[in-house]
Image: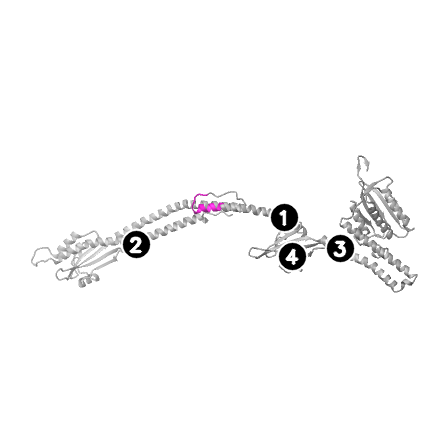
Amino acid sequence: MKKVSFFQSIRIKFIVILILLLLLAIQVIGAYFAERLEVSLEESFTTNVEQRLQDLTYYLEKTFNKERPEDSEGPTLQQEVRETLRLYDSELYSDLQVIDTQSRVIGANNQYDRIGKRITGEVGVTRALLFGRDKTATELDAYGKRMLVRIIPLYDEDEDEVVGVVYLKASMEEVYSQLQSINTIFLNGTILAIVVSALLGVLVARTITKPITEMRRQAIIMSTGDFSQKVNVYGSDEIGQLAITFNEMNEKLKQAHLTTEGERRKLSSVLSNMSDGVIATDNTGNITLMNQSAADLIGRTVEEVKGLPLIEVLQLDEKVVDLVESQETGSIIIDLSDDDQFFLIKANFSVVQDEADRFTGFITVISDVTEQEKVERERREFVSNVSHELRTPLTTMRSYLEALTDGAWQDKEIAPQFLSVTQNETERMIRLVNDLLQLSKMDHKEQTLYKERVNITTFFHHIIDRFEMNKSEDIILDRKLPKENVFIWVDKDKITQVVDNIISNAIKYSPEGGTIKFKAVKDKQKIVVSITDQGVGIAREKVDKIFDRFYRADKARSRDIGGTGLGLAIAKEMIAAHHGRIWAESKEGKGTTVLFTLPLIKKKRGNQS
């Protein structure tokens, strides 16, 4: 997982949020404090000026209302006003003037050259003289400094008339200088508070984020499947409770992982050991999982088919349009045969749904049914052959019996011939039924072998002698048997039937004057018997089929000579029951050799027993 940088971490976010909150609080407090401080300083300054001005105006009114005889040698009004201004002057006053009713300056605290001059252009002074209105205002002087302007009318005590005006300007720069100094101090304090808060924020954020960082690290470890570690619990607060809950979740995930892993192993073992193939798909029909059995059946690896459509892999494009519908019809047979091999598989489709009954994919089970289909075809062919073999003699018998019924029985020459044919066909049916019963018993393992110790030399000589006594004069039987005694454990009746069937076939297919060679030799722990004729032979691709039931290399000739097509099939079953093997070798035009083996009796203590 990508490492989180410091500037992307929750720690820096926490610090930034803390600083922003602190700045917001400081700005709100600072704005309110500055506003209230400015108002307070201005009010304090104004109050101070007013208090001093009240005393000044009081004595100025006394001075204006004082009686002065014209011939008196006492101080004049101007002198007394100047004396009063000198006594009650203050460093707060930047400009202080006393004006009489003629708008002439009769006193000032500075710029004495203005004394005796008239004031023009000052509306406030004029209003105060004419209407007795005072004035309080804040103005900027020529240098841009803020000044408090105060114009106060002076009244005659008796007649309540304006006798003069006090014109005052007081500089407020000291107030704002104090305010600026305080703001500077506040700003420095703010910067210091931010620095301290940032340091504290780092420590606090580290305390808060350390458990979260540990939980993140543990979550990364858990994602790899390792649930052995736990996070540390640093307290009982919310983060501590979160750590406890995280450890509990870790334990539950560990148990769930163990359970899931166990189930996965079981499922993997089941899928790996299933003889049937299993293919899983997603909701789009693309393959997501396949076991080895399925890979062997379709001849493609899991990596090759993963992500491919199931319909394409199983070659169902033209056979199945909707796989969801196919599950309702049971299984389907898919022909994957090629020019070299016959191959069929059976596929069963099941729909997978989630808890909300939504379609999530398919589970397809496939199995090899080639042998089953072969067996089914052989069964159908067997039933067809049996029906055909039974129908032929029955049809012949019915025809001859109908002829006899219609009056042919009265013909002394034809009737015996018809009866002879009917008898032969009956015997043929009996042989066929007996062979079928015998094969049926062998198929159901109901045939019991009665083995005994037999000397093959004497045994085979006896069988061949019987054939020589009953054979046609133009067939020669050439025998090559061991001169010494060779003993085997066999069921004499069953092996006699095997040899009879093979020799009978050799005689049937041998030409007139032909020779049948019978040979038996010892080969290690078995006896190998071969019977060779000089018939027309069998094509190479048909040699292995002569041991199939009802198979005839030459069907027309076989029926003419009365064969059932079961003799070699019975021989094969009997030899297999004796733990031997039977096969044929043939070339077209050069005859056929049928060979079989039988195990010899094992020697004990140096003696043959």
Amino acid beneath label 1: Val
The alpha-carbon separation of the residues under discs 3 and 4 comes to: 33 Å
Percent of width and height locating residue 528:
82, 44
Question: Which span of residues is magenta-colored?
Answer: 233-247
Label 3 vs label 1, nearer the camera: 3
Q: Nearer the viewer, residue 171 or 398?
A: 398
Q: Earlier in the sequence, mark 2 or mark 4?
A: 2
Which numbered disc flags the more N-terminal residue, 3 or 4?
Answer: 4
Judging by the rendered image, the residue that carries numbered circle 1 is: 270
Q: Quadrant of residue 407?
A: bottom right
Query: CA–CA distance between discs 1 and 4?
Result: 26 Å
Contact flag, marks 3 and 2 (Cβ < 8 Å) = no
- What residue type is disc 4 on? Glu
Query: Disc 3 designates what residue?
Result: 379
The image shows residue 170 at horizontal and vertical percentages of 22, 54
Instruction: Bin the neighbour count of mark 2 within 10 Å (Cα to Cα): few under 14, some 14-19, many 20 and up.
Output: few
Residue where numbered disc 2 is placed: 35
Q: Is residue 93 visible?
A: no
Sequence-earlier tag: 1 or 4: 1
